[in-house]
Image (tube, rainbow, N blue to C red):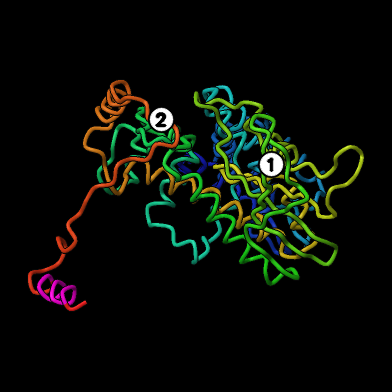
Amino acid sequence: MAPIAPLAPIAHLASWLDATEGEEPAITKRELCENETLSPVVQRLYAEARKVNTALPMTFQAFLDRAAADDAPAVRTKAGRVRWAVRVREGLNEQKVQQWCAQASLLDKHRVAEMAGGWMLKEPPYEAKFQRPVFQIAMRIRYGLKVGPAIPYVSVQVCGARKGDGTVCGKALDAVGQHALACKCGGHSHHRHDACRDVLGRHLKPLVTSVKFEQFIHELAQPDEDTGETRAARLDLVVQTKVGKALLDVRVFHPLGPDGRKAGKYTLTANEKDKYDRYPTHKDGRRLTNATIVPIAVNTFGAVGEKAQEFFQPLGNARELVDLVSVMGVFGSAEKVLSVHSPAKIPAAPLQAVARDRAVRAVRPPQQAGAAEPKKRVAKFAALPAKAKAKAKAKTRVK
Protein backbone atom coordinates (compact mmCIF):
# COMPACT_ATOMS: atom_id res chain seq x y z
CA MET A 1 0.00 0.00 0.00
CA ALA A 2 1.44 3.34 -1.06
CA PRO A 3 0.13 6.94 -1.23
CA ILE A 4 -1.11 8.09 -4.64
CA ALA A 5 -0.20 11.76 -4.17
CA PRO A 6 3.16 11.32 -5.99
CA LEU A 7 1.20 10.22 -9.09
CA ALA A 8 -0.49 13.63 -9.38
CA PRO A 9 1.83 14.92 -12.19
CA ILE A 10 1.07 11.80 -14.26
CA ALA A 11 -2.69 12.21 -13.82
CA HIS A 12 -2.49 15.94 -14.59
CA LEU A 13 -0.50 15.31 -17.78
CA ALA A 14 -2.94 12.61 -18.91
CA SER A 15 -5.88 15.02 -18.48
CA TRP A 16 -4.21 17.57 -20.78
CA LEU A 17 -3.56 14.91 -23.40
CA ASP A 18 -7.15 13.61 -23.17
CA ALA A 19 -8.32 17.07 -24.19
CA THR A 20 -6.61 16.56 -27.59
CA GLU A 21 -8.75 13.52 -28.46
CA GLY A 22 -12.11 13.38 -30.23
CA GLU A 23 -13.57 14.76 -33.46
CA GLU A 24 -13.57 18.32 -32.14
CA PRO A 25 -10.78 18.46 -29.54
CA ALA A 26 -10.52 21.41 -27.17
CA ILE A 27 -6.85 21.77 -28.04
CA THR A 28 -4.42 20.07 -30.42
CA LYS A 29 -1.17 18.28 -29.75
CA ARG A 30 0.57 20.92 -31.84
CA GLU A 31 -0.72 23.63 -29.50
CA LEU A 32 0.58 21.69 -26.49
CA CYS A 33 4.03 21.69 -28.08
CA GLU A 34 4.13 25.18 -29.66
CA ASN A 35 1.68 27.47 -27.85
CA GLU A 36 3.54 30.13 -25.85
CA THR A 37 1.25 29.68 -22.85
CA LEU A 38 0.50 25.95 -22.87
CA SER A 39 3.85 24.55 -23.97
CA PRO A 40 5.86 25.61 -20.87
CA VAL A 41 3.12 24.23 -18.59
CA VAL A 42 2.99 20.86 -20.35
CA GLN A 43 6.79 20.62 -20.62
CA ARG A 44 7.09 21.25 -16.87
CA LEU A 45 4.39 18.64 -16.17
CA TYR A 46 6.18 16.11 -18.35
CA ALA A 47 9.46 16.72 -16.51
CA GLU A 48 7.69 16.08 -13.18
CA ALA A 49 6.02 12.96 -14.61
CA ARG A 50 9.43 11.60 -15.68
CA LYS A 51 10.64 11.92 -12.08
CA VAL A 52 7.82 9.55 -11.09
CA ASN A 53 8.05 7.26 -14.12
CA THR A 54 11.61 7.09 -15.40
CA ALA A 55 10.53 4.72 -18.20
CA LEU A 56 9.05 7.64 -20.16
CA PRO A 57 11.07 8.95 -23.17
CA MET A 58 13.50 11.80 -22.64
CA THR A 59 11.40 14.44 -24.42
CA PHE A 60 7.69 15.19 -24.64
CA GLN A 61 7.78 15.09 -28.45
CA ALA A 62 9.39 11.63 -28.41
CA PHE A 63 6.61 10.47 -26.08
CA LEU A 64 3.94 11.75 -28.49
CA ASP A 65 5.66 10.13 -31.48
CA ARG A 66 5.81 6.74 -29.75
CA ALA A 67 2.14 6.97 -28.78
CA ALA A 68 1.11 7.81 -32.34
CA ALA A 69 3.00 4.82 -33.76
CA ASP A 70 1.47 2.27 -31.35
CA ASP A 71 -1.94 0.85 -32.32
CA ALA A 72 -2.08 -1.85 -29.62
CA PRO A 73 -5.63 -2.40 -28.26
CA ALA A 74 -4.38 -2.02 -24.70
CA VAL A 75 -3.52 1.63 -25.28
CA ARG A 76 -6.40 2.62 -27.61
CA THR A 77 -10.18 2.62 -27.33
CA LYS A 78 -12.48 1.00 -29.89
CA ALA A 79 -12.93 4.42 -31.47
CA GLY A 80 -9.14 4.70 -31.90
CA ARG A 81 -8.54 7.25 -29.15
CA VAL A 82 -5.32 6.95 -27.19
CA ARG A 83 -5.66 5.88 -23.55
CA TRP A 84 -3.33 8.54 -22.20
CA ALA A 85 -3.76 7.48 -18.57
CA VAL A 86 -2.35 4.09 -19.60
CA ARG A 87 0.34 5.62 -21.79
CA VAL A 88 1.87 7.84 -19.13
CA ARG A 89 1.99 4.93 -16.65
CA GLU A 90 3.73 2.47 -18.99
CA GLY A 91 6.66 0.83 -17.24
CA LEU A 92 5.74 2.34 -13.86
CA ASN A 93 4.64 -0.93 -12.24
CA GLU A 94 7.78 -2.73 -13.43
CA GLN A 95 9.84 0.13 -12.05
CA LYS A 96 8.13 -0.17 -8.64
CA VAL A 97 8.70 -3.93 -8.60
CA GLN A 98 12.40 -3.44 -9.23
CA GLN A 99 12.63 -0.82 -6.48
CA TRP A 100 10.78 -3.08 -4.03
CA CYS A 101 12.98 -6.09 -4.86
CA ALA A 102 16.08 -3.99 -4.24
CA GLN A 103 14.85 -2.90 -0.79
CA ALA A 104 12.75 -5.85 0.47
CA SER A 105 14.08 -8.38 2.93
CA LEU A 106 14.46 -12.04 1.97
CA LEU A 107 11.52 -12.96 4.24
CA ASP A 108 9.23 -10.45 2.49
CA LYS A 109 10.27 -11.79 -0.91
CA HIS A 110 9.43 -15.33 0.15
CA ARG A 111 6.07 -14.21 1.52
CA VAL A 112 5.10 -12.33 -1.64
CA ALA A 113 6.18 -15.25 -3.86
CA GLU A 114 3.53 -17.48 -2.23
CA MET A 115 0.62 -15.04 -2.42
CA ALA A 116 -2.71 -15.03 -4.24
CA GLY A 117 -5.02 -12.02 -4.15
CA GLY A 118 -8.41 -13.16 -5.48
CA TRP A 119 -9.75 -13.82 -1.98
CA MET A 120 -9.63 -10.11 -1.08
CA LEU A 121 -12.57 -9.39 -3.39
CA LYS A 122 -14.69 -12.32 -2.21
CA GLU A 123 -17.22 -12.55 0.59
CA PRO A 124 -16.51 -15.47 2.94
CA PRO A 125 -19.26 -18.11 2.96
CA TYR A 126 -21.95 -17.42 5.55
CA GLU A 127 -21.84 -20.93 6.98
CA ALA A 128 -18.18 -20.47 7.98
CA LYS A 129 -19.18 -17.76 10.50
CA PHE A 130 -15.78 -16.13 10.79
CA GLN A 131 -15.31 -13.56 13.55
CA ARG A 132 -15.06 -9.87 12.68
CA PRO A 133 -11.32 -9.32 13.35
CA VAL A 134 -10.42 -12.17 10.97
CA PHE A 135 -10.39 -10.04 7.79
CA GLN A 136 -8.15 -7.40 9.39
CA ILE A 137 -5.76 -10.08 10.61
CA ALA A 138 -5.73 -11.69 7.15
CA MET A 139 -4.81 -8.38 5.51
CA ARG A 140 -2.04 -7.77 8.05
CA ILE A 141 -0.62 -11.24 7.43
CA ARG A 142 -0.68 -10.56 3.68
CA TYR A 143 1.34 -7.35 4.03
CA GLY A 144 3.68 -8.63 6.75
CA LEU A 145 2.32 -6.23 9.38
CA LYS A 146 1.96 -6.78 13.11
CA VAL A 147 -1.27 -8.62 13.94
CA GLY A 148 -1.65 -7.07 17.41
CA PRO A 149 -3.63 -3.96 16.34
CA ALA A 150 -6.30 -6.20 14.77
CA ILE A 151 -6.82 -8.28 17.93
CA PRO A 152 -9.45 -6.52 20.08
CA TYR A 153 -8.89 -8.38 23.34
CA VAL A 154 -5.99 -9.22 25.61
CA SER A 155 -3.12 -10.83 23.75
CA VAL A 156 -0.67 -13.34 25.22
CA GLN A 157 3.06 -13.39 24.58
CA VAL A 158 3.57 -17.17 24.72
CA CYS A 159 1.75 -19.90 22.80
CA GLY A 160 -0.58 -21.68 25.22
CA ALA A 161 -1.77 -24.35 22.75
CA ARG A 162 -1.49 -27.85 24.17
CA LYS A 163 0.25 -30.78 22.54
CA GLY A 164 -1.16 -34.27 22.26
CA ASP A 165 0.40 -35.28 25.60
CA GLY A 166 -1.28 -32.36 27.38
CA THR A 167 1.83 -30.20 27.72
CA VAL A 168 1.87 -26.55 26.65
CA CYS A 169 3.68 -25.48 23.45
CA GLY A 170 5.31 -22.60 25.34
CA LYS A 171 7.09 -20.97 22.39
CA ALA A 172 7.21 -17.19 22.12
CA LEU A 173 4.67 -15.56 19.80
CA ASP A 174 6.12 -13.22 17.19
CA ALA A 175 4.45 -9.93 16.22
CA VAL A 176 3.51 -10.95 12.66
CA GLY A 177 1.85 -14.26 13.56
CA GLN A 178 4.48 -16.52 12.05
CA HIS A 179 4.49 -19.05 14.91
CA ALA A 180 0.69 -19.13 15.15
CA LEU A 181 0.42 -19.92 11.44
CA ALA A 182 2.92 -22.78 11.65
CA CYS A 183 2.11 -24.21 15.12
CA LYS A 184 0.40 -27.61 15.01
CA CYS A 185 -0.62 -27.75 18.67
CA GLY A 186 -4.06 -27.15 20.11
CA GLY A 187 -6.21 -28.54 17.30
CA HIS A 188 -6.48 -25.22 15.44
CA SER A 189 -5.05 -26.71 12.25
CA HIS A 190 -7.62 -29.53 12.33
CA HIS A 191 -10.46 -27.05 12.78
CA ARG A 192 -9.19 -25.01 9.80
CA HIS A 193 -8.93 -28.14 7.66
CA ASP A 194 -12.40 -29.40 8.59
CA ALA A 195 -14.01 -26.02 7.90
CA CYS A 196 -12.44 -25.90 4.42
CA ARG A 197 -13.54 -29.48 3.69
CA ASP A 198 -17.13 -28.95 4.83
CA VAL A 199 -17.66 -25.68 2.94
CA LEU A 200 -16.11 -27.06 -0.25
CA GLY A 201 -18.28 -30.19 -0.05
CA ARG A 202 -21.48 -28.18 0.31
CA HIS A 203 -20.61 -25.96 -2.65
CA LEU A 204 -19.73 -28.96 -4.82
CA LYS A 205 -23.08 -30.70 -4.29
CA PRO A 206 -25.07 -28.68 -6.90
CA LEU A 207 -22.32 -29.24 -9.50
CA VAL A 208 -21.79 -33.02 -9.26
CA THR A 209 -23.80 -36.23 -8.93
CA SER A 210 -22.99 -36.88 -5.26
CA VAL A 211 -20.66 -35.84 -2.45
CA LYS A 212 -19.78 -37.98 0.58
CA PHE A 213 -17.77 -36.78 3.56
CA GLU A 214 -15.02 -38.63 5.47
CA GLN A 215 -15.13 -41.95 3.64
CA PHE A 216 -12.86 -44.96 4.26
CA ILE A 217 -11.43 -46.26 0.97
CA HIS A 218 -10.50 -49.86 1.67
CA GLU A 219 -8.65 -50.36 -1.62
CA LEU A 220 -6.11 -47.71 -0.61
CA ALA A 221 -5.38 -49.07 2.87
CA GLN A 222 -1.62 -49.56 3.32
CA PRO A 223 0.46 -51.52 5.87
CA ASP A 224 2.33 -49.31 8.31
CA GLU A 225 6.06 -50.08 8.04
CA ASP A 226 6.67 -49.05 11.66
CA THR A 227 3.90 -51.01 13.40
CA GLY A 228 3.01 -53.61 10.79
CA GLU A 229 -0.65 -52.73 11.17
CA THR A 230 -2.91 -51.70 8.31
CA ARG A 231 -3.16 -47.94 7.93
CA ALA A 232 -6.67 -46.93 6.91
CA ALA A 233 -7.23 -44.49 4.06
CA ARG A 234 -9.88 -41.94 4.99
CA LEU A 235 -10.49 -39.34 2.30
CA ASP A 236 -12.11 -35.99 3.01
CA LEU A 237 -14.56 -35.99 0.08
CA VAL A 238 -15.69 -38.69 -2.33
CA VAL A 239 -17.15 -36.89 -5.34
CA GLN A 240 -19.02 -38.62 -8.16
CA THR A 241 -18.91 -36.61 -11.39
CA LYS A 242 -20.07 -37.30 -14.93
CA VAL A 243 -16.66 -38.67 -15.85
CA GLY A 244 -16.01 -40.79 -12.75
CA LYS A 245 -15.23 -40.84 -9.05
CA ALA A 246 -12.75 -38.44 -7.47
CA LEU A 247 -11.20 -38.79 -4.01
CA LEU A 248 -10.50 -35.30 -2.66
CA ASP A 249 -8.07 -34.75 0.20
CA VAL A 250 -7.77 -31.24 1.61
CA ARG A 251 -4.57 -29.73 2.96
CA VAL A 252 -4.20 -26.20 4.33
CA PHE A 253 -0.57 -25.39 5.14
CA HIS A 254 1.80 -22.55 5.87
CA PRO A 255 4.32 -22.17 3.00
CA LEU A 256 7.12 -20.72 5.13
CA GLY A 257 9.39 -22.57 7.53
CA PRO A 258 9.83 -21.79 11.24
CA ASP A 259 12.37 -19.09 10.36
CA GLY A 260 9.95 -17.42 7.93
CA ARG A 261 11.82 -18.59 4.84
CA LYS A 262 10.53 -20.66 1.96
CA ALA A 263 11.58 -24.30 1.79
CA GLY A 264 10.99 -26.99 -0.81
CA LYS A 265 8.70 -29.09 1.39
CA TYR A 266 6.37 -26.14 1.94
CA THR A 267 5.39 -25.57 -1.71
CA LEU A 268 2.03 -26.38 -3.27
CA THR A 269 3.62 -28.95 -5.58
CA ALA A 270 5.36 -30.71 -2.68
CA ASN A 271 2.13 -30.93 -0.70
CA GLU A 272 0.26 -32.33 -3.70
CA LYS A 273 2.99 -34.94 -4.19
CA ASP A 274 2.76 -35.86 -0.51
CA LYS A 275 -0.93 -36.70 -0.97
CA TYR A 276 -0.17 -38.92 -3.98
CA ASP A 277 2.54 -40.70 -2.00
CA ARG A 278 0.19 -41.14 0.95
CA TYR A 279 -2.51 -42.79 -1.19
CA PRO A 280 -0.85 -44.75 -4.05
CA THR A 281 -3.36 -45.94 -6.64
CA HIS A 282 -1.04 -48.58 -8.16
CA LYS A 283 0.82 -51.48 -6.59
CA ASP A 284 2.98 -54.11 -8.29
CA GLY A 285 1.87 -52.90 -11.70
CA ARG A 286 -1.86 -53.16 -11.02
CA ARG A 287 -4.41 -50.45 -10.33
CA LEU A 288 -5.95 -50.51 -6.86
CA THR A 289 -8.96 -48.29 -7.56
CA ASN A 290 -10.78 -46.73 -10.48
CA ALA A 291 -11.14 -43.46 -8.58
CA THR A 292 -8.81 -40.49 -9.05
CA ILE A 293 -6.89 -38.90 -6.19
CA VAL A 294 -7.25 -35.09 -6.21
CA PRO A 295 -5.18 -33.09 -3.68
CA ILE A 296 -6.90 -29.83 -2.69
CA ALA A 297 -3.87 -27.88 -1.49
CA VAL A 298 -4.10 -24.24 -0.37
CA ASN A 299 -1.59 -22.21 1.60
CA THR A 300 -2.18 -19.59 4.27
CA PHE A 301 -1.73 -16.78 1.71
CA GLY A 302 -4.54 -18.08 -0.52
CA ALA A 303 -2.62 -19.78 -3.34
CA VAL A 304 -4.42 -22.93 -4.60
CA GLY A 305 -2.64 -25.91 -6.16
CA GLU A 306 -2.82 -26.75 -9.86
CA LYS A 307 -4.42 -30.16 -9.30
CA ALA A 308 -7.39 -28.59 -7.53
CA GLN A 309 -7.80 -26.02 -10.31
CA GLU A 310 -7.70 -28.75 -12.96
CA PHE A 311 -10.42 -30.69 -11.12
CA PHE A 312 -12.68 -27.63 -10.80
CA GLN A 313 -12.32 -26.63 -14.47
CA PRO A 314 -14.88 -29.02 -16.10
CA LEU A 315 -17.41 -28.56 -13.29
CA GLY A 316 -18.33 -25.04 -14.35
CA ASN A 317 -17.90 -21.99 -12.11
CA ALA A 318 -14.27 -23.03 -11.64
CA ARG A 319 -13.06 -19.55 -10.69
CA GLU A 320 -15.62 -19.34 -7.88
CA LEU A 321 -14.53 -22.71 -6.48
CA VAL A 322 -10.85 -21.72 -6.55
CA ASP A 323 -11.64 -18.44 -4.79
CA LEU A 324 -13.79 -20.32 -2.25
CA VAL A 325 -10.90 -22.62 -1.30
CA SER A 326 -8.58 -19.60 -1.23
CA VAL A 327 -10.91 -17.68 1.11
CA MET A 328 -11.23 -20.64 3.46
CA GLY A 329 -7.46 -21.11 3.57
CA VAL A 330 -6.75 -17.44 4.30
CA PHE A 331 -9.60 -16.74 6.71
CA GLY A 332 -9.14 -20.06 8.50
CA SER A 333 -5.46 -19.24 9.02
CA ALA A 334 -6.28 -15.74 10.27
CA GLU A 335 -8.80 -17.23 12.71
CA LYS A 336 -6.08 -19.58 13.91
CA VAL A 337 -3.81 -16.60 14.63
CA LEU A 338 -6.65 -14.94 16.54
CA SER A 339 -7.23 -18.07 18.63
CA VAL A 340 -3.53 -18.46 19.48
CA HIS A 341 -2.83 -14.78 20.23
CA SER A 342 -6.10 -14.21 22.09
CA PRO A 343 -7.28 -17.58 23.41
CA ALA A 344 -10.69 -17.95 25.05
CA LYS A 345 -9.02 -19.42 28.14
CA ILE A 346 -5.66 -17.80 28.84
CA PRO A 347 -3.21 -19.84 30.94
CA ALA A 348 -2.12 -17.95 34.05
CA ALA A 349 1.55 -18.40 33.18
CA PRO A 350 2.22 -20.61 30.14
CA LEU A 351 5.97 -20.75 30.71
CA GLN A 352 5.46 -21.71 34.33
CA ALA A 353 2.98 -24.33 33.19
CA VAL A 354 5.61 -25.79 30.87
CA ALA A 355 8.16 -25.96 33.70
CA ARG A 356 5.55 -27.47 36.04
CA ASP A 357 4.58 -30.15 33.50
CA ARG A 358 8.20 -31.11 33.00
CA ALA A 359 8.82 -31.28 36.75
CA VAL A 360 5.76 -33.46 37.31
CA ARG A 361 6.84 -35.88 34.57
CA ALA A 362 10.32 -36.06 36.12
CA VAL A 363 9.11 -37.14 39.59
CA ARG A 364 6.00 -39.14 38.66
CA PRO A 365 6.73 -42.90 38.52
CA PRO A 366 6.01 -44.45 35.13
CA GLN A 367 2.61 -46.15 35.00
CA GLN A 368 2.68 -49.81 34.10
CA ALA A 369 1.11 -50.84 30.83
CA GLY A 370 -2.50 -51.88 31.28
CA ALA A 371 -2.72 -50.51 34.80
CA ALA A 372 -5.88 -48.51 35.37
CA GLU A 373 -5.99 -45.40 37.54
CA PRO A 374 -7.91 -45.89 40.82
CA LYS A 375 -11.46 -44.61 40.68
CA LYS A 376 -12.58 -42.00 43.17
CA ARG A 377 -15.40 -43.14 45.43
CA VAL A 378 -18.36 -40.80 45.45
CA ALA A 379 -21.15 -40.98 48.03
CA LYS A 380 -24.32 -42.36 46.54
CA PHE A 381 -26.49 -39.34 47.34
CA ALA A 382 -23.76 -36.71 47.79
CA ALA A 383 -24.72 -34.61 44.75
CA LEU A 384 -28.48 -34.50 45.58
CA PRO A 385 -30.33 -31.73 47.47
CA ALA A 386 -31.63 -32.52 50.97
CA LYS A 387 -35.24 -33.26 49.92
CA ALA A 388 -34.13 -35.35 46.95
CA LYS A 389 -31.79 -37.33 49.24
CA ALA A 390 -34.61 -38.20 51.62
CA LYS A 391 -36.89 -39.18 48.75
CA ALA A 392 -34.22 -41.36 47.14
CA LYS A 393 -33.42 -43.12 50.43
CA ALA A 394 -37.12 -43.77 51.02
CA LYS A 395 -37.43 -45.42 47.60
CA THR A 396 -34.37 -47.52 48.38
CA ARG A 397 -35.96 -48.77 51.62
CA VAL A 398 -39.22 -49.66 49.82
CA LYS A 399 -37.33 -51.74 47.28
Residue 230 seen from this side: yes
The answer to whether residue 288 is left or right of residue 381 is: right
Which residue sits at x=55%, y=39%? 45
Q: Is residue 68 left or right of residue 34?
A: right
Residue 264 percent location from the top left of the image: 66, 27
Tell me what residue is drawn at x 58 percent, y 46 percent: 302
Closer to the N terminus: mark 1 or mark 2?
Answer: 1
Q: Main secondary structure of the magenta part?
A: helix
Q: In terms of depth relative to the viewer, which is nearer, 316 or 280?
A: 280
* Mark 1 and mark 2: Cα distance apart in space: 26 Å
Q: According to the image, label 1 marks what residue?
A: 230
Residue highlighted by disc 2: 368
Label 1 is placed on what type of residue?
A: Thr
* Residue at 88% over, 47% down: 287
Q: Which residues are magenta?
A: 389-397
Q: Horizontal and vertical percent for residue 151?
A: 32, 46
**Vertical arrangement, residue 146 with respect to residue 23, above or below:** above
